[in-house]
Image (cartoon, rainbow, N blue to C red):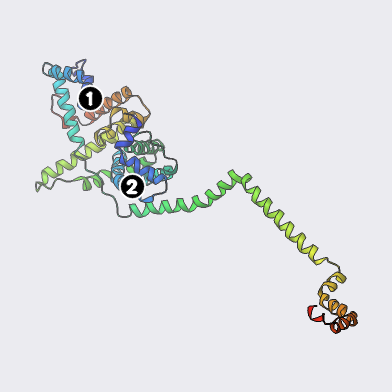
């Protein structure tokens, strides 16, 4: 898909271009459209609300700073998630988050929030809570690149090519990352699968 | 030991919709005859379902306020830096108006000083020019009287 085609289909690029010419309302529209998506992405990287929000603010500030020199080269969503992915991977490399998640009971914190099952059956609710804890632990155990590739694919629907742009990797490299990521997750979550898996 | 099939590698891109049309048809046919790949695909779909059990995260109350505060801080630092940066890059363009202003000031100062240096006698002469004209009339009074007598004074 050529750049003109991308621009024609992507109103978000037009908003960003308006922002680059000084229209702050255009940035506000983009901020509101992506705020929750970016926070959720960061949260699933670290499972820590505070870190997720700090990182998200950094990410939006980078978008704001880049406004005046913005040149569209891909869909806006691909571009902003590339910034988010790099911010998360840098945070992961710094290792700052480790001490913090060790010091708080993040599973309980998450479980309290992530229960959406309104069932009156307490046993089912507890099971669902436990399962979500295991899923979050399994995701957190993945190496950074595998985690990023899987999150971008599973929750945000990016193609292998777009994930390749975001992670500076080839499509075949992304295919391999996603395959290994799923393999690792299934090993971590083997209790959730039937005995034959 | 887990049984494998050489085509299992195609199941991830198959599930993700990343295969070309001919490969999709191949895998669809293959799944109808290979139990290993069928089980593997089922396992991948179960994993996908599990991952989607996680909910989105709510945005905290002060997220927006903190973010816009950071934007304001950035803007507060950026504007003076922007002006300083412009001056650092374009200082040559600033020289011309400075030089023009300097020349103009020098010109005005010189003019004022030259005006003040006019000799005092010349100034008195200019200031009392009317008196000199009257003196001239008084000196030639007899001529004027004679002309009046001859009846042409009214024309003067």
- In the foreground, A159 or B141: B141
Residue A183 rendering spot, x and y as whole percentages: 24, 26
- In the foreground, B53 or A190: B53
Residue closest to the far front: B150
Residue in view at x 43 percent, y 44 percent = A65
Position of residue A119 in the picture relative to residue B148 (left or right): left
Alpha-carbon span between mark 1 and mark 2: 33 Å
Query: Tag 2: Cα neighbours inside 10 Å, few (<14), some, or many (≥20)?
Result: some
Chain assignment, label 1: B
Query: Tag 1: Cα neighbours inside 10 Å, few (<14), some, or many (≥20)?
Result: many
Q: Secondary structure at mark 1?
A: helix
The residue to which callout 2 is attached is A31
Position of residue B35 in the picture relative to residue B99 (left or right): left
Q: Is residue A77 above or below residue B100?
A: above
Check the picture and name the quadrant holding the C terminus of chain B. bottom right
The residue to which callout 1 is attached is B12
- In the foreground, B91 or B85: B91
Q: How many marks?
A: 2
């Amino acid at each position: 898909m050529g750049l003109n085609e991308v621009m024609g289909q992507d109103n978000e690029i037009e908003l960003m271009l308006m922002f680059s010419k000084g229209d702050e309302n255009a940035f506000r529209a983009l901020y509101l459209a992506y705020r929750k998506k970016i926070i959720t992405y960061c949260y699933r990287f670290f499972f820590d609300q505070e870190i997720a929000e700090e990182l998200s603010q950094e990410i939006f500030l980078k978008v704001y700073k880049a406004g005046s020199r913005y040149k569209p080269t891909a869909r806006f969503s691909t571009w902003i998630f590339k910034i988010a992915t790099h911010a998360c991977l840098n945070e992961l490399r710094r290792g700052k988050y480790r001490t913090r998640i060790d010091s708080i009971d993040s599973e309980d914190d998450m479980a309290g929030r992530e229960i959406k099952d309104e069932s009156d059956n307490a046993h089912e609710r507890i099971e669902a809570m436990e399962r979500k804890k295991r899923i979050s632990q399994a995701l957190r155990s993945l190496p950074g690149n595998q985690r990023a590739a899987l999150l971008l694919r599973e929750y945000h629907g990016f193609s292998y090519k777009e994930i390749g742009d975001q992670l500076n990797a080839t499509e075949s490299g992304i295919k391999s990352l996603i395959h290994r990521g799923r393999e690792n997750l299934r090993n971590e979550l083997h209790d959730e699968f039937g005995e034959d898996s | 030991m887990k049984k494998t099939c050489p085509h299992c590698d195609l199941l991830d891109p198959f599930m993700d919709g990343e295969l070309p049309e001919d490969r999709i048809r191949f895998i669809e046919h293959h799944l109808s005859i290979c139990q290993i790949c069928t089980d593997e695909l089922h396992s991948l779909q179960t994993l996908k379902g599990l991952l989607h059990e996680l909910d989105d995260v709510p945005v905290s109350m002060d997220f927006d306020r903190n973010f816009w505060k950071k934007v304001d801080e950035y803007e507060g630092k950026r504007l003076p830096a922007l002006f300083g940066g412009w001056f650092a890059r374009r200082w040559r363009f600033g020289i011309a108006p400075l030089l023009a202003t300097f020349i103009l000031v020098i010109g005005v100062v010189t003019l004022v000083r030259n005006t003040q240096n006019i000799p005092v006698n010349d100034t008195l002469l200019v200031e009392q020019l009317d008196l000199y004209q009257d003196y001239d009339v008084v000196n030639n009074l007899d001529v004027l009287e004679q002309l009046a007598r001859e009846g042409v004074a009214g024309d003067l």
